[in-house]
Amino acid sequence: MIATILMGLIIGLPSGYFMKVSFGGSTLIGFIVCVVVGIIGSLIGGCFGSALKIKNIILQFILDIVGACVLIAILKFVF
């Protein structure tokens, strides 16, 4: 579980940063919100992988990225 949280933080931070840079002026949300959303999305993806008992670190890494991207995309469509 601790590995899931650490991986979520490591993946979520750059995901949120990338979202803010790539969507720049088109979003009304701030940098901190983007980073937090990236971290939360990555944690959701990691917890989903843990619930499925995925032990492969590469698959867990991919689920973290997918979780962050999905949550960021949802946030982009909302705002």
Image (cartoon, grey):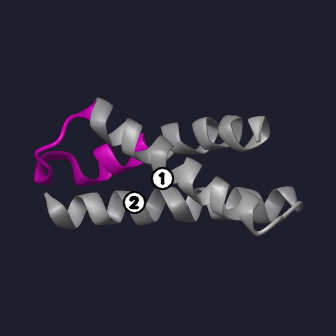
Helix, strand or loop for disc 2 = helix
Q: Check if residue 21 falls in the magenta segment.
A: yes
Q: Which residue is mark 2?
A: 71
Relative vertical location of residue 41 with respect to residue 62 in this rendering, above or below: above
* Mark 1, other Cα within 10 Å: few <14 / some 14–19 / many ≥20: many
Percent x, y for residue 51? 73, 63
Quadrant location of the N terminus?
A: top right
Q: Are marks 2 and 1 in contact (CB under 8 Å)?
A: yes
Cα separation, mark 2 vs mark 1, equals 5 Å
Q: Nearer the viewer, residue 48 or 73?
A: 48
Q: Residue at x 50, y 37 (%)?
A: 13
Extent of the magenta region: 16-31
Quadrant location of the C terminus?
A: bottom left
Left or right relative to 33: residue 29: left
Left or right relative to 7: residue 56: right
Q: Nearer the viewer, residue 62 or 54?
A: 54
Q: Residue at x 12, y 54 (%)?
A: 26
Percent x, y for residue 3? 78, 39
Q: Which residue is mark 1?
A: 41
Q: Residue furthest front?
A: 51
The chief SS type of the magenta part is helix
Q: Of callouts 2 and 1, which one flags the residue occurring earlier in the amino acid sequence?
A: 1
Amino acid under disc 2: Leu
